[in-house]
Image (tube, helix red, strand yellow):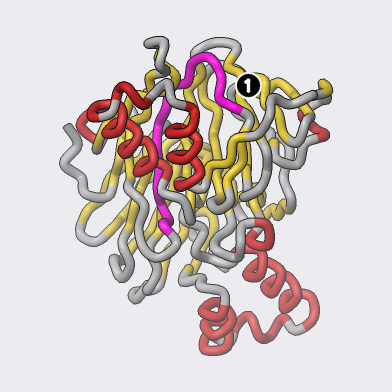
Amino acid sequence: MNDNKYLIDINDKSNWLRVNMDIRTNGELCEEQRIIIYPEGPNQRFEFTDSIFYGSTSYHEHSNGWETFFVVDGSMDFTVHGKTCTVTNGDILFVPPYCSHQMMFLQPTRWRATFHDINMCGILNNWNTAQKYFPDKMDDPFFTSSYLANKNNIIREAPYDTRVDKSELREVRPVDKWLNRYDLDGVCMKQIIARWENNGINEMWRFEMEDGFFANYRAIIPNGDLFYVTEGEVVFNVGDETFTAYHDCLVKIPAFVPRSLKSKGKSVMYDIGGMTHWLDVVEDYLSLKHNNPERLTETNYMNGVLERHDCYIQSYGINTSQR
């Protein structure tokens, strides 16, 4: 069991806050959901689950809530608005409200999911409770449709679909597909989900870090962070603790807790919390670098630029090089 209060090994069962089982009326298991982080705050941010799916889901959409899925094992046919493609390990799915979708799992498929503005683990918690106390209602289509509608879940008719390549679906984000890319000193930043398509709540970036890349933060950081390490190792200094995050680890850091990080070898990490407006930060930095480079050396001015975009990094680079 991990005693570190900031490091979460997703595969460590002691870190599973609850396990929900979605069992169909015929007794078949549809989903085994492990809750890693419960949603927090008015926008129900930071929710993170680890699930294994079987069979298929209904064709449905949500009237509220944004869903992001990391496919880590298995494969599925993913249907969006009547178009179907096959997704596999490494693909990321981004599903906003009123986006009709269905998953048909070609084999037991594992994904990690994060949400906001929808309490997905709470929905399955309540469904498990209904199954326990009202088993006779599980075959009642009126009860199930009423329950799901109350949970922002709208069941659609089975789709008439056409087969397409996954590159045609904007809801599918393979590892080689990104919205923006910036190569900086020691890190390649790839924007996977934009703030404008995520209701302005957050954005998600993939950081491909070189050996020795570091990021030092300012002393006072009013925002929390949630990072997801998928490759390699990253050494964190958080509060009074130093630890190494590795493949399949989350790092959850509350607001006002000091932090810094350094890549140990090459590593890949996602900023899932997405509090920082990274696109604005990089665009403003590059604009200043080309149009007004002397401003980059003015500490107070640059602090104002970064704070405007909720960025509290003081320095970054490889070894002793800094920006």
Describe residue 218's horizontal placement relative to residue 300 as left or right. Answer: left
Is 68 part of what is drawn in magenta?
no
Q: Which residue is mark 1?
A: 88
Q: Is residue 86 above or below residue 157?
A: above
Describe residue 293's horizontal placement relative to residue 209 as left or right. Answer: right
Q: Is residue 294 above or below residue 111?
A: below
> Secondary structure beneath disc 1?
strand
Q: In the image shown, does 232 or 89 lie closer to the viewer?
A: 89
Give the quadrant of residue 279.
bottom right
Q: Callout 1: 10 Å neighbours few (<14), some, many (20+)?
A: some
How far across and down, in percent of the image, does residue 158 sit? 69, 25
Q: Is residue 58 visible?
A: yes
Tell me what residue is drawn at x 36 percent, y 63 percent.
Answer: 41
Describe residue 204's horizontal placement relative to residue 135 as left or right. Answer: right
How far across and down, in percent of the image, does residue 42 sit? 40, 65
How far across and down, in percent of the image, does residue 46 sit? 41, 52
Q: Is residue 212 visible?
A: no
Tell me what residue is drawn at x 54 percent, y 63 percent.
Answer: 201
Quarter placement of the C terminus: bottom right
User: The magenta stretch spans which residues?
Assistant: 44-58
